[in-house]
Amino acid sequence: MKKAFLAAALAVGLCVPSYAAEQYQPNLEANKASYPVFEEEDQTLANFGVHNEQAGEKQVVKQKRTQAAEKTGKEREFAIPANKNQDDNIDLTTGRITRDQALRDLAMHDPDYVPPEKRKNRKKAVDGPQPVILNGDHVEFENATGDFLATGKVKLSQGEDTVLTSYAFGNMKTGDIYLLEGGTILGPGSRLEGKWLHFNYNSKTGEIKQIEGRGPKDFFKAPHAFILPDKVVADQGGRVTRCTAQKSTPCMHVEAKRVEFYPKEKMVAHDVKVFVKGKHIYSRKLWINEFKETRQYFKPSAGWDGKDNGWYIKLSDSEALSEKDTLKIDLIQYSRNGFKPQYKFIHDERNWKFTYANVWEEDDDWWYHKQNNYRFDYKPHHIADGLPLSYSAYFEYGLWSNYDIKSGKNDHKSWRKEYAYYINHDPIKLFGPDTTLHLTYGRKWIDEDYTNDKVATNMYYATIRQKIDSNKRMWASYLREKRSNSLFEIGQSDMDRELRLGMQWSPTKNDTLSVVHRYDVGEREFRNVGNKLITTRNYETTYNWYHRFCCWALQVSYEKEWYKDDHQIRLQYFYYNW
């Protein structure tokens, strides 16, 4: 079986696998928070971490695949035991059909099957098949025709991919392989079982019946699927869930009339129904999940968001309008600050992204309203081949305003124009692959209509990450950026120069603990808070505990705000598994 085939076939079990996303450089200042995402491909976002609310959504699982074996020009490899028997009519094992009977069965099930005696003029594929290793308790092979029959403990392997079965039949020359009694396909992080399978590794096409499998995060079932060179199509519908409670009703699952899997790209489902605990909640015509980013989701959450906001309940919904257009809605109700919705329309191309937004956002307990906000992001591109530098940029324009909590009104409305560019260095490995250095330089401009301010500032970011083992990580970041606006606090750096130290530990597969400490390494300042004289050098310490249940998660955060001698406790219970 050709490597490309197995990659496609395994995608059936990888409903929504998590592949590392393209580097993407948003407004960095607004994303400095608790603890980072450790991905080799993420150069800058991970330097500063993801917001606590996103912790359950940013887990990324990377899969590495080896290069396919080189063509040797020799006969395809296969393993044949010394006790092989080439008698066409031999009873291979007790109760097994003979080879002739297998030929007749194939002719009945596969209308395209060509018997050996009629294959003289059958055209071979232009590109010869790559090596496949075949092992079995009993293997029968005819060199003249290329037919083989394997029984017992049968194993077909190529690179990191393996097929296990008790009965395999096919032809090494035409590339056809049949698993008439079903089998199991294994790959990195995935397992797929089928009751019946046919595949041609020359044309990279095939068919699977009664599929059941799983990937790194997803469980999948379908009665039938076609394997095509570029995708796998479950044409008779399918069911997908990420809930690990497979023996009981899953917390949430999706059923669709037709599902298309594009390896390493996306899943496209048509005529979709979403179920929660077995009850149909809502339907949609189209559901698209990019493997690099979850475009569609339905996530409820609730919790306590500190003394200023109080209790809240939130519903996040993302709808794919087309393969490139997405509508995102966050409906949030706070007990102390009322209703703060967010609406976004996103058009996403390969090299750039456009966003139109009307949102409420908070920064350091201050609320801001962005109306008719347009943003264009140019995604990271390497400057030249072989040069470890990439560049990215964004342009944002909209009507911003402060929100006065006491009066409940917006004030200081200003049409704000902001744009910036970034130069990122590829991760630099220090002392081995577990220690990496990440460097970023940028420059930002802001133009405020309300105050006629036109300012610019340079941005310098550096982070060293250390992976101690699979459960422990540490990092240290240095951030330098001068305050560039006096009208709005949102998106600005808290300090001109900051040192951030962090540690993350996962004592169990369901628990993650982290500590992040922030220092002001600029000029030493003192403030009167109450009757105390405190220094802002020791700025803030955040402690996080994150616990995953079946499909829900609980996160508790304690923030010690040294700079104003205060503290905050935040609690969040949210659905993270989609």
Image (tube, rainbow, N blue to C red):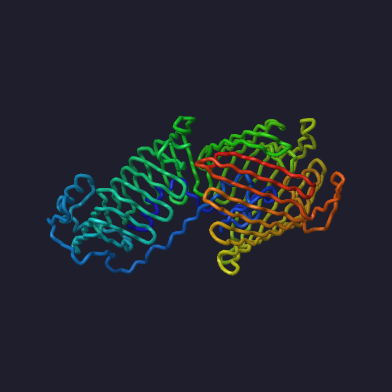
Going by the picture, which residue comes out furthest to the front?
507
| Quarter occupied by residue 503 | bottom right
State which quarter of the image contains the N terminus: bottom left
Q: Is residue 56 left or right of residue 333?
A: left
Q: Is residue 403 left or right of residue 155?
A: right
Residue, x 46% and y 43% (percent of image)?
A: 242
**Total number of numbered discs in the rendering:** 0
Residue, x 33% and y 60% (percent of image)?
A: 157
**Viewer-proximal residue among 246 and 482:** 246
**Viewer-proximal residue among 576 and 328:** 576
> Residue 542: image x %, image y %?
69, 49
Q: Is residue 528 left or right of residue 208?
A: right
Residue, x 65% and y 32% (percent of image)?
A: 333
> Residue 244: image x %, image y %?
45, 43
| Quarter occupied by residue 146 | bottom left
Q: Is residue 271 left or right of residue 139?
A: right
> Residue 74: image x %, image y %?
29, 69
Rendered position, 111 above or below 474: above
> Residue 304: image x %, image y %?
66, 37
